Image (cartoon, rainbow, N blue to C red):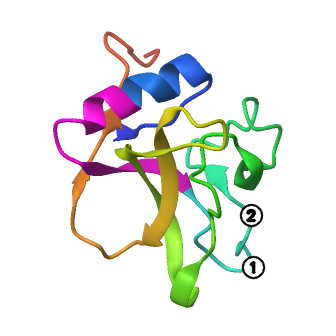
Amino acid sequence: GQLATFGSDNEFRELVQISTDVGRAWIGLSDRGNNNEGKWKFIDDDSTFCGGDCDTLDQWRPGQPNDWGSGQDCAEVTDAMTDQNGASGAIQDEECNTQQSYICEFQIGAMAAV
């Protein structure tokens, strides 16, 4: 498994729904790493949904990502804020060492060839 990512607004809304139980939760979106500041990408490297430019997703809270304090390199989802279109639920950047819940995804029944 891995931290959850999303490939559509419907999948994002599912993550928002899950976050209602915990408030805020980590998802698999980051600009962490050497020379990656401002280059947000999903941890599974699938950039189909964001077209390779995940820092302009509509699901970001207005004004985000902002790297406030020069250390916010991980993304969290929350239902307590609105996104760029005013819909309930948004992502924002946060310091990666912040302790909070997380949402994971995994494939069921996936097997490697032997």
Point out residue 99 in the picture as x, y percentages from the top left corner.
22, 69
User: For mark 1, what is the residue?
Assistant: 35
* Mark 2, secondary structure of its residue: loop
Q: Is residue 112 shown above or below 49?
A: above
* Mark 1, secondary structure of its residue: loop
Query: Quadrant location of the N terminus?
Result: top left
User: For mark 2, what is the residue?
Assistant: 39
Residue 62 lies in quadrant: bottom right
Tell me if 42 is positioned left or right of 104 in this view. right
Highlighted range, magenta: 16-29
Point out residue 76 in the picture as x, y percentages from the top left corner.
41, 54
Point out residue 64 in the picture as x, y percentages from the top left corner.
62, 62
Which residue occupies the foreground of this view, 25 or 52? 25
Q: Is residue 24 magenta?
A: yes
Q: Is residue 105 shown above or below 25?
A: above
Q: Nearer the viewer, mark 2 or mark 1?
A: 2
Q: Are marks 2 and 1 in contact (CB under 8 Å)?
A: yes
